[in-house]
């Protein structure tokens, strides 16, 4: 999931809204203390800011890191306003399952719930990196730059995250 | 659980894709103005970038230069030509008005001095303080 298939058009509000507001909201899920309503507000605000700052976007450069930097700044500002205490992964929401065959749907729901619970036990940096890389399609280097850690650290953390997820899964369901 | 070996990366991708899907379905219609901004009276953002055309403002220097030229020309003209009768009449009228205003101002000044120097009881029976 890299940039939207068409060329970035940050000066086109409709394009920004349709393609990037949901992605901003999905990225904000990496911050567990941000509520659903705030997440939508942040996503809308991010789109608005990106639109207003569209003149500063350099054509030819990847749009996603530029946009997610805006979202991240907004999210961090929001977190600074919140009380310190936030239960880890407490508000990571369950994604509804799709209408598919019952067995497949049940498996998927089980896997989603498992991954959700697993991510809830990880720290914020892991969750944010995973969201950016596996959810928003950024490269590990781009995600590392965005969150302010060395690229090697991001890669190592993602590796550890995958390994821990596999271990947790195999503990729960055996070696399959 | 499942038929193949568990792929954590694929599971993570599916998880985040489901989250994104949920976000897409949660608010499909663009509300062009975020609620927080609407509450504060923001009129919103245009669907298309709209750069309002602003006519160039007359610079202050040009205005000052125009005024100087006008008064310079008027002064030169008034020295070179005697003023026509209607202007003289108007000047006399203005002079009278000026004298009248001066007389009125002087009368007001005297009244104010009297008010200031008068005893409190004479100024205000209701106990308001006097101005200083």
Image: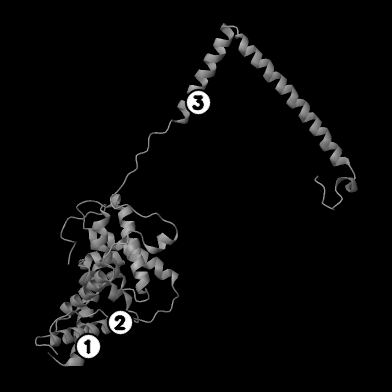
Q: Nearer the viewer, mark 2 or mark 1?
A: 2
Locate residue A17, reporting x and y percent: 27, 60
**Quadrant where the N terminus of chain B lies?**
bottom left
Query: Chain letter of disc 3?
Result: B
Residue at which label 3 appears: B64
Q: Is residue B111 above or below residue B22?
A: above
Q: State left or right for residue B3 relative to residue B47.
A: left
Query: Chain letter of disc 1?
Result: A
Q: Nearer the viewer, mark 2 or mark 3?
A: 3
The residue at the point 41 percent across, 63 percent down is B36
Q: Which of marks 1 and 2 precedes in the sequence?
A: 2
Image quadrant in which you'd find residue A169: bottom left
Q: Is residue A47 above or below residue B14?
A: above
Image quadrant in which you'd find residue A86: bottom left
Which disc, if any, is residue A120?
A: 2
Count every numbered label the image shows and give the total.
3
CA–CA distance in space, label 2 to label 1:
13 Å
Locate residue A70, reporting x and y percent: 32, 61
């Amino acid at each position: 999931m890299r940039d939207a298939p068409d060329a970035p058009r940050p000066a086109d509000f409709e394009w920004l809204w349709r393609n990037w507001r949901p992605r901003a909201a999905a990225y904000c899920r990496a911050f567990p203390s941000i509520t659903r309503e705030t997440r939508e507000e942040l996503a809308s605000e991010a789109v608005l800011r990106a639109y207003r700052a569209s003149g500063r976007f350099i054509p030819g450069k990847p749009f996603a890191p530029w946009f997610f930097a805006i979202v991240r700044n907004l999210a961090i500002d929001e977190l600074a306003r919140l009380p310190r205490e936030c239960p880890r992964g407490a508000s990571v929401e369950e994604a509804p399952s799709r209408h598919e065959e019952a067995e497949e749907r049940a498996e998927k729901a089980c896997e989603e719930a498992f991954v959700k619970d697993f991510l809830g036990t990880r720290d914020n940096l892991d969750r944010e990196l995973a969201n950016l890389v596996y959810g928003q399609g950024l490269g590990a280097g781009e995600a590392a730059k965005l969150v302010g850690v060395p690229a090697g650290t991001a890669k190592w953390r993602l590796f550890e995250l995958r390994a821990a997820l596999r271990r947790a899964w195999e503990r729960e369901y055996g070696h399959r | 659980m499942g038929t193949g070996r568990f792929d954590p990366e694929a599971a993570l991708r599916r998880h985040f894709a489901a989250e994104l899907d949920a976000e897409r379905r949660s608010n499909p219609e663009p509300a062009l103005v975020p609620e927080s901004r609407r509450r504060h009276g923001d009129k919103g953002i245009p669907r298309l970038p709209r750069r309002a055309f602003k006519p160039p403002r007359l610079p202050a220097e040009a205005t000052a230069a125009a005024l100087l030229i006008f008064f310079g020309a008027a002064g030169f003209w008034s020295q070179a030509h005697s003023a026509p009768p209607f202007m003289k009449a108007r000047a006399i009228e203005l002079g009278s008005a000026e004298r009248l205003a001066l007389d009125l101002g002087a009368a007001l000044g005297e009244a104010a001095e009297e008010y200031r120097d008068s005893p409190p009881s004479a100024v205000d029976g209701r106990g308001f303080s006097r101005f200083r």
